[in-house]
Image: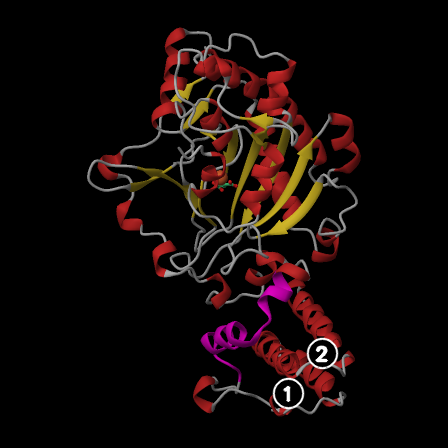
Amino acid sequence: MNSRLTTLARTLKSTSKKLFSSSTQSTSTTSQFPQTLVGLRALLAAESPSLTDFADNLKSNSSYSVEVGTKKNPLSQAQMDEGGRPRRREMASALSNSFNVTEFVVNQGNGVKGLADLGIEAVPQQYIQPLHERFDSSITNPQHSTIPIIDFSNSDDPQVKEAICEAAANWGFFQIVNHGIPIDILHGLKASVHRFFDLPVPEKRKYLKDSPSESVRLATSFSPRAEQVLEWKDYLMMLYVSEDEASASWPPECRHEAIEYMKRAEIVIKRLLQVLLDKLNVKEIDKENEHMLMGAMRLNFNYYPKCPNPELTAGVGRHSDISTITVLLQDDSGGLFVHREGDITDSWIHVPPVNGALVINVGDVLQIMSNDLYKSVEHRAVPNRNTSRISIPIFVNPEPQALIGPLPQVLESGERPIYKQVKYSDYFSHFFSKPHDGKKAIEFAKLHV
Ligand SMILES: O=C(O)CCC(=O)C(=O)O
Ligand SMILES: [Fe+2]
């Protein structure tokens, strides 16, 4: 039996166990579970008729007697092929109409990858964005404009420094090449992301809610409890406290590669912050500033499975990051778009994958500290129909207790502050308590005069 069938059979078995072990469920729950079984049975039927016997056995051995649960097959003749098996389209809709997607994806830890691995041909309704949130590919890259690409090899050169500050102020996004992190390290890291997500679900499940370490967590979408519509993304979040802590707690499939990368990236991050802060009259980054700028770094592995309806879904919805800066490594599939305000209309600019490059973007914290000189800009990720995509952001965040607000050096010329001082952990909690919504989060720190 191939591994996909094994996964299907396991899913069916665990769903069935839930269904048949409970005799006290409410009517609405009980009528949902048998349909789940029907959806899974439909998938199995196309894969292997013999496995459907297994499904039927489970049903007939139960004392379950709600009408929908005892139906032999809910599909009409027209929905079947010559062999009496459900057509692929009907399987997808059986799945999307009845399957308890949130339970399967979020609570059981199968992730959206688990859903995509079932071979669905249409996204379930939980992933369908309202019209105004769907990505309109007709408004991308007007005049073929693209974000700046900066050679970082000579970052002491005043012209390079100026180009960095200019990009952070005007675009909020740029790419750097020749940053000093060897390409082998980048390739090794990307391979380790696939190694992690390709693990069997029971292995990955260790890092769900009861993760052995507070600093490692596997999750899906953005903030599923706060969201009406789920995002087509799974992610592993790893807090970088120290090399020792990471060595003890990060998953063995990617630990070595991730730590090597973080050590090298830290050098690039410090240099970038020095350049950006110099322009704000902060000539030296002391210990206190370091806590405020980069006291808590988070490395995420984002995994976007291939998606049957990318035009209906969001990999990551419109948002700005709440970091100081973000350093992102993407694979070569493409799918990251940056918002660009135009004189007449706004547009979305694609960030093309450039071999060996790192994408840098300004987060809300740097916008606040610079009192709006630098801009955190909305961006979004669109999943791909034909291939999965990974991206690896480092969110360079202040430490949770840090107070963030416009820097004194920025205000010393008499400039009026646009933001108040807020505790970073409050800002963070506020951001995660709502679905992604463009640049709304920054309002939390705005002074309303
Ligand atoms: O995957 C990407 O390219 C962007 C991801 C992103 O914006 C994020 O994780 O905040
Ligand atoms: Fe982001």
Please give the name of the residue rendered at 50% of the width and 60% of the height, measured from the top-left corner: 228
Mark 1 and mark 2 in contact? Answer it, CB < 8 Å.
yes
Q: Which residue is mark 2?
A: 19
Quarter containing the C terminus: top left
Dot 2 falls on a residue whose secondary structure is: helix
Residue 391 forms part of the magenta stretch: no
Q: Which residue is mark 1?
A: 69
Dot 1 falls on a residue whose secondary structure is: helix
Q: For the residues marked 1 and 2, what is the alpha-carbon distance in whole angstroms? A: 10 Å
Residue 113, image x and y in percent?
Answer: 58, 56
Residue 95, image x and y in percent?
Answer: 54, 73
Please give the name of the residue rendered at 75% of the width and 87% of the height, measured from the top-left corner: 62
Q: Is mark 1 within 8 Å of ligand 1?
A: no
- Above or below, comparing residue 11 to residue 374 in the picture: below
Q: Is residue 131 visible?
A: yes
391 left or right of 238 in image: left
Q: Residues within 10 Å of mark 2 (few under 14, many from 20)?
A: many
Query: Which label is found at residue 236?
Result: none
Magenta stretch: dominant secondary structure = helix
